[in-house]
Image: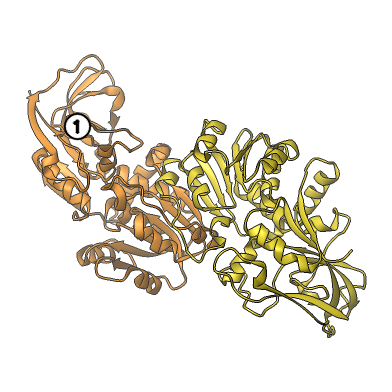
Chain colours: A orange, B yellow
Amino acid sequence: MNNTRVLLKQRSEGVPAEQNFELENVAADMPGGGDLLCETLYLSLDPYLRGKISGRHISGAINEGELMAGETVSRVIESKSEQFNQGDIIAAHSGWQSHPVISADAARTVNPELGPLSTLLGILGMPGLTAYAGMMRLAELKQDDVVVVSAASGPVGSMVGQIAARHGCRVVGIAGSAEKCRWTVEQAGFDHCINYKTEVLRDSLRRACPEGIDVYFDNVGGDMLQACMEQLATGARVILCGLMAQYNTNEMPPGPNPAFIIKARATVRGLVVYDHEDLRPEFEQRVSQWLKQGEINYREDCVNGLEAAPRLFCRLMRGENFGKAIVKVAE
Amino acid sequence: MNNTRVLLKQRSEGVPAEQNFELENVAADMPGGGDLLCETLYLSLDPYLRGKISGRHISGAINEGELMAGETVSRVIESKSEQFNQGDIIAAHSGWQSHPVISADAARTVNPELGPLSTLLGILGMPGLTAYAGMMRLAELKQDDVVVVSAASGPVGSMVGQIAARHGCRVVGIAGSAEKCRWTVEQAGFDHCINYKTEVLRDSLRRACPEGIDVYFDNVGGDMLQACMEQLATGARVILCGLMAQYNTNEMPPGPNPAFIIKARATVRGLVVYDHEDLRPEFEQRVSQWLKQGEINYREDCVNGLEAAPRLFCRLMRGENFGKAIVKVAE
């Protein structure tokens, strides 16, 4: 059986380019005892992969010549484990390949009844759990809080805003195009969305949040974090989750002056989704229900075939995707 | 009756100089209804006053030609209020003057039994309460935590360390002279103290905290905050309290990259002591008891007479004081 794989050919200094990746076709490995031979259905592309390419993500590095990493939903086509049967749908970190051999211990059963399979990598998967943990566990959300979220039309940001809206908060998104802004307001129920590419961010934030920001969920870092820190309300909570502004650099640019945190008596927390695995059953059950009842919305930027993965990943790292970046590998 | 006052003559750009201040002798004001004519006994000099001189402290500005601000302990020599009697000892923000008229509403009764009168401005006053609120309310202190505190021999830092030590934490101070370091270890019971002027701070922190920093109480900001952020343990708590590194500038220098907070899943909180007034009775009762039982220690840098206040304040702003900066104005 043939296995199509995408390797990291060359580490990029800045924004990744398609030629940094290489497609190869090899014979699929044979599953040993305890292993599963799988067919990848969907591959998730996420910004944290850029950190792995630079070798500075907490989940480890991707070296040149190695398989690109990534979470997948796949179907078991041959099981050498008693834990799984042929035909089971599983999630695993099996990377950019069509026919991986996955150790049963590294696979997680997913329930295809929860929602469309692709959403198990998005709103019902890691990005959704990130938003859920941040808002339900770290944000100390109160009714009428003014909640600001950056990368607002992405899978984390759109969930953050929709969870906040369900709690009676006023939700202001920040996104990079008129189309993205329109979607967050019209489809995801945000109260307002700022287009940071055409508006003066600080002025728009001041207008949208005249009493200050109660909760800022940051997926970006850099100047966007700085601008929001300047306008925190007293007692604000800031959740630091992503650093899109610096993923494409090897620099560690400085952050906001600590005086903003003192002045607002703010609480700033770092969020790593791996710490909140215990929330997953509750999260899946609730979000699946919201989804089935049509109470929340999501947006995917989906391409077909592994050969299209490098291009989508590069678009993602330029902020040109619109919604969760997903590669459909097989039906 | 004569009132000796110290005015701000000129705002300084950088570190204040003695010639920025001016001494004058005027007739004391007459107390109106509800007022108290007082004799200042002790005046507290604190770093936040530098922020008031720059006009960017949350408690308001001191303008050129105005009386220098500061908290005092004084004796009522004439009362036009039913709330206080002649001879009462009170605390108030009556500034750098020998014979202020204070509105009874702005005065706070202090209990001279708690400890020596000067300590009501130090370990038993605002700096002590700052440390107490930070450690008891914000730090989520656990036994065996590795607690690091900067400006360790100062009134806030030395209390932070001593409270942490009482909780079974390992306490590492950072201070600016061998003498200060020796005092924190020998007199205040710290486990270790780093002399940041002669040691390589990052190396010394690594040696002193090989498993990382669980709690960092920051009185300084700047590179000291940065160095500690680089060595946080997972789940660390950081309390931002003071910004000595930037009080003497009009700049807002950048702070640490947010990645350090995310990587450590840290919680960073801004501390403003005014928010924790409700803790004062409990704080006074407990700290007074510790003091009387000889369980905690403190250090004062005390000068005599208001004419000596500008020089001590300038030393304080250069970090050359050793212990709580206090002006003894009268017996």
The percent position of residue B144, horizontal first and vertical second, equals: 62, 33
The image quadrant that residue A304 belongs to is: top left
Q: Does residue A116 show up?
A: no
Pick the front one: A140 or A225: A225
- According to the picture, the residue beneath numbered tag 1 turns out to be A64
Amino acid type, mark 1: Glu
Secondary element type, mark 1: loop
Residue at point 80% right, 51% down? B285
How many marks the image carries: the answer is 1
Residue lying furthest right in this view? B86
Pick the front one: A307 or A8: A8
Above-or-below relation of B18 to A328: below
Residue B62 lies left or right of residue A183; in this view the side is right
- How crowded pointer 1 is (Cα within 10 Å; few <14, some 14-19, many 20+) is rated as some
Pick the front one: B241 or A234: B241
The percent position of residue B229, horizontal first and vertical second, equals: 48, 44
**Chain of the residue that carries numbered disc 1 in the rendered image:** A
Residue at point 43% right, 44% down? B260
Q: Does residue A59 show up?
A: yes
Residue B29 lies left or right of residue A132; in this view the side is right
Residue lying furthest top in this view? A33
The percent position of residue A64, horizontal first and vertical second, equals: 19, 32
The C terminus of chain A sits in image quarter: top left
The N terminus of chain A sits in image quarter: top left
Residue at point 54% right, 35% down? B204
The image quadrant that residue B316 belongs to is: bottom right
